[in-house]
Image (tube, rainbow, N blue to C red):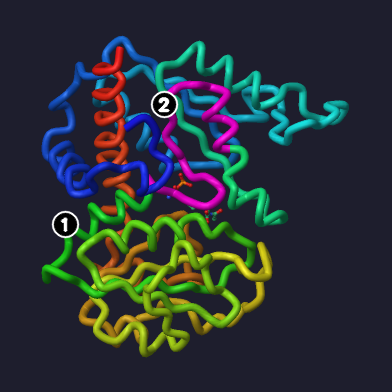
Amino acid sequence: MKRFTSVHDVPNIDDLVRSAREFKSAPRRSESLGSGLTMGLLFLNPSLRTRMSTHIAARNLGIDVMVLNVGNDTWSIETRDGILMDGAAGEHMKEAAGVLGRYCDLLGIRTFPGLVDRDYDYAETVLESFITSCNKPVVSLESATRHPLQSLADLVTIDEHKQTPRPKVVLTWAAHPKALPQAVPNSFVEWMRRAPVDLVITHPEGYELAEEFVGDVPVEYNQDVALDGADFVYAKNWSSYRDYGKIVNTDPTWQITRNKMARTAQAKFMHCLPVRRNVIVADDVLDSASSIVLDEAENRIYAAQAVLAAMVQDLRSSS
Ligand code: AN0
Ligand code: CP
């Protein structure tokens, strides 16, 4: 793999899930695979899990890691093209990415959407310009429209916990005080469509995700109906795609509570984290044995490790 920005970059998903599960059982099994290589992680937005799990994954493979937080550690970076740079930004992404490409063998970048200009965000303008300018293999650490390392970890977690060969997985929206990206739900749907699961999406009207992601996945506007018989409940807030970046519903009854979980087939509760307690999910669900959010977060390490191992193998064979 030369890049990992979406499910479409992955030649074989089953192999990647298997590799992640093998790394989980023996994290240091390829500890010299990446020796002599350096990975740079560039964060334009905050992170807890992605920052640490990707670092641990690289370390398990013997890769050196350098982390940069844009704006704190670096100059402020301009990402728009053709701009007169007489404002706050001291450096353009083209030079920043170009320099990082000279220093590092592999790069990762987190770049959230602006949630103002839908075409700009959905063209993945910042991610694609970074990839072009750095000219090195790039891993998305969450971009404007996708979070593939999260989705792979989610798939590994479902694979570990499933009790039936083809579980029912429900992606449900829940209200949130801030406008959040569609990246996590887009990506989750994109990966689940390629996995042995029956996926149902539920959200209020006005929260339809882009058609390119949803395809023929059933959308049920009644959350109670969607939850009936679910094996996995995956909660997430996102802002409107249609009325781009806007909050168009604040109905608190979409929160996942014990009563909601009672409709399911003793479903496991999933969320990518960070999660707001008693906003997205009630304490008594998040603190119950049915919550597998920490397994998901732990699996971020092995998902990243499987991806990095595949990229390093590619790098070694092409040099
Ligand atoms: C981000 C999002 O919704 O995309 C990151 C999730 C991994 N969440 C928040 O900003 C709260
Ligand atoms: N789930 C996830 O990506 O978390 P962070 O934003 O903390 O990295």
Three-letter amino acid code of the residue under disc 2: Pro
Q: Quadrant of residue 232?
A: bottom left
Rendered location of residue 188, percent (x, y):
38, 59
- Ligand 2 within 8 angstroms of badge 2 C-beta: no
Could you tell me which residue is drawn at 48 percent across and 72 percent down?
173
- The N terminus, quarter of image: top left
- Name the one closer to the observer, 182 or 160: 182
- In three-dimensional space, the C-alpha distance between marks 2 and 1, rounded to whole angstroms, equals 29 Å
> Dot 2: what SS?
loop
According to the picture, the residue beneath numbered tag 2 turns out to be 137
Of tags 2 and 1, the one toward the viewer is: 2
Q: Is residue 27 left or right of residue 178?
A: left
Rendered location of residue 210, percent (x, y):
53, 65
Q: Looking at the picture, does residue 99 appear above or below residue 287?
A: above
The span picked out in magenta is 127-149
Three-letter amino acid code of the residue under disc 1: Glu
- Name the one closer to the observer, 213 or 114: 213
- Name the one closer to the observer, 316 or 161: 316
Mark 2 or 1 closer to N-term?
A: 2
Q: Is residue 35 magenta?
A: no
Q: Looking at the picture, does residue 240 appear above or below residue 21?
A: below
Q: Looking at the picture, does residue 11 appear above or below residue 217?
A: above
Q: Is residue 215 left or right of residue 75?
A: left
Q: Which mark is residue 160?
A: 1
